[in-house]
Structure formats: structure tokens, C-alpha cells
Image (cartoon, grey):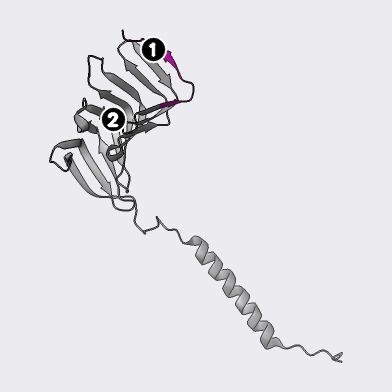
Amino acid sequence: MTGGYHVHWLPLGFAALLALLSAWLNQVAERTVVQDNAGFSHDPDYVVEDFRVQVYDLSGRPRHRLGARRMTHYMDDDSSELERPQFLATANGESPMSVTARRGVILGDRESVHFLGDVRAARGTAHGLDAFILTGEHLRVVPDANILSSDTPVTLSQGRSVIHAGGLYVDEHNQRLEFTGGVRGLYEKIH
């Protein structure tokens, strides 16, 4: 006795096959590992020993210079790592400013250099004043905009004046100096 119900096996079989195929495709898609957006691994594509680059202004005078023992470039994100970087800014007729560190990083935009580990920045004496010396573990330098910044603790000293802060922002073009995060120090006024 059939009871009046007639089952259509072909559409049910097709639906089950479609469900199994969807589950299989979902598993395959989850297993795919992409190394990065461009499909490259983070391997160096070239290395430059005794790296040096000099930038000049429109009248041919040196503006700033960047050097390192070694520069390693990575194609996947267009970044460069620097070993023992040295930066020197000589623009605007002011005292030269130098920055050194254990290592540095230039990101793909090439607008800034990140100095990392034992960072020391110094601006030479001017107008009879002692040199400014900045120390810390990280300093971002944007040479074309004359900006220095750090979001890690820094110490700024000039003569016997010493200021400790959680970070800083310096815009030399607009003559702005801003300390952040637990600022403390001793400032000795010059007579």
C-alpha cells in the first residue's frame, strides 16, 4: 500500500549533491593561505651595503642626508630596513640636526624614517646656546615636513635643563614643540 504519497528522488538527489559541493568548496576556501595582499613573502629583493642618499633643495644646496651600514629592501610592502642609520638635516641655515639609532625602517610611502633602539637626536649650538639632545627608543622623522615625533618615552636635554616625557611632537616649520604623557623635568633659564 502506497498511501498516496509519491517521492521524487531526482530533485532530492540533486539538492543533496549541491549541499555536499557547497560544503567541499567552503572547506577548500578556508584552507587557502595568502601571504600578503600582493602574494609575495617578506623576503628581501635587494641589499645595499654602505647605503647613502643625499637630498638637495632647488638651488642645489644639501637639505638632508641619510646613510646606513646596510639597507635591506622588501618587495612585498616596499619597506626598507636600515642597520645603524645616520640622518643629518642641514636646511634653512640653522644648526645641523643629526639622528642616529641601532636600526631604522622606511615604509613604502617613503615620507618618513622610523629610528629604533638607542635613538639619539642632536641639534648643534646656535646663538650661544647649548646643543639640544633627544634620547629614546623610537623617533619618527619626516624630513620634507621638518617633523619629529615619538609615542614612546623621550628625554630632552639642553645644558643643565632636562625634560622627560611619554612622547613628543616637533614641527620645526611651525615652531611647535609638544610633550605628552607624564611630563616632568628641570628647566634652567638662560640669563
Residue 161 place in picture, x, y as percent: 35, 12
Quick one: label 1 or label 2, which is nearer the N terminus? 2
Residue 189 lies in the magenta stretch: yes
In the picture of the structure, the residue carrying the numbered disc 1 is 187
Q: Which residues are magenta?
A: 178-190
**x%, y% of residue 158?**
31, 15
Looking at the rendered structure, the kind of residue marked 2 is Arg
Figure quadrant of residue 50: top left
Observer-nearest residue: 90 or 35? 90
The verdict on residue 99 being magenta is: no
Q: Depth check: 42 or 173 in front?
A: 173
Neighbourhood count class around disc 1 (C-alpha, 10 Å): few under 14, some 14–19, many 20 upward = few
Asked if residue 137 is positioned above or below residue 64 in the image, the reply reads above
Residue 138 visible, this angle: yes
Please tell me in which quadrant of the rendered image residue 93 appears: top left
Numbered disc in front, either 1 or 2: 1
Amino acid under disc 1: Tyr
- Measuring 65% from the left and 80% from the top, which residue is drawn there? 15
Residue 56 place in picture, x, y as percent = 16, 40
- Quarter holding the C terminus? top left
